[in-house]
Image: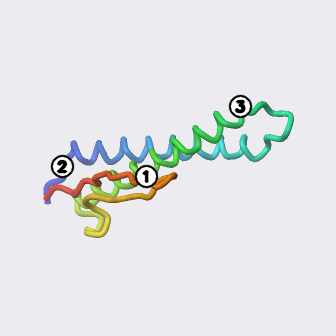
Amino acid sequence: MKVDTKKLDALIKCAKYLKKLEDSYQRNSSVAAIMNADTSIKKRNAAFNKMETDAEAIEDQLHELHCLAVELGVADRDDSRYGEKIVAGGRGIERRFYKREPMS
């Protein structure tokens, strides 16, 4: 069996970036947890916004990591994870986005 080194490098890079995002999320969540009434609204909002951005990026990286693992043959394909997804947003807005499928 021949291993695609480019995909393996991409998988490693994706996993490292995922770890960095998770560390950032944890750091901001601990900052948000210790914030009290003395903390400015601007600082609290910045921490919560960063957490939200990190959470979305973590979800995207987990999906990419899974796709790369499937392409390398170390994970099973799960068809429910791929294709167009619709997520309900606030105020009746729907967000549509496409989750890529692993290449054969």
Q: Which mark is residue 1?
A: none
Cβ–Cβ under 8 Å for marks 2 and 3: no
Cβ–Cβ under 8 Å for marks 3 and 1: no
Tell me the amino acid under the disc marked 3: Lys
Left or right of 51? Residue 1 is left
Q: Residue at x 14, y 55 (%)?
A: 2
Q: Regarding mark 2 in the picture, which secondary structure is present there?
A: loop
Which callout, 2 or 3, points to the residue nearer the camera?
3
Residue under numbered circle 2: 4
Along the line of sight, which residue is nearer the eye, 5 or 33? 33
Q: From what the image shows, is residue 56 above or below residue 80? A: above
Q: Within 10 angstroms of label 1, few (less than 14), some, or many (20 or more) residues?
A: few
Mark 3 to mark 1 CA distance (whole Å): 28 Å
Tell me the amino acid under the disc marked 1: Ile
Of pointers 2 and 3, the one earlier in the residue sequence:
2
Mark 2 to mark 3 CA distance (whole Å): 45 Å
Cβ–Cβ under 8 Å for marks 2 and 1: no
Give the image quarter of residue 75.
bottom left
Q: Within 10 angstroms of label 3, few (less than 14), some, or many (20 or more) residues?
A: few
Which callout, 2 or 1, points to the residue nearer the camera?
1
Mark 2 to mark 1 CA distance (whole Å): 41 Å
Which callout, 3 or 1, points to the residue nearer the camera?
1
Q: Which mark is residue 43?
A: 3
Give the image quarter of residue 88.
bottom left
Residue under numbered circle 1: 93
Position of residue 44 measured from the top left corner of the image (x, y, whole percent): 71, 36
Tell me the amino acid under the disc marked 2: Asp
Q: Regarding mark 3 in the picture, which secondary structure is present there?
A: helix
Position of residue 18 measured from the top left corner of the image (x, y, whole percent): 45, 46
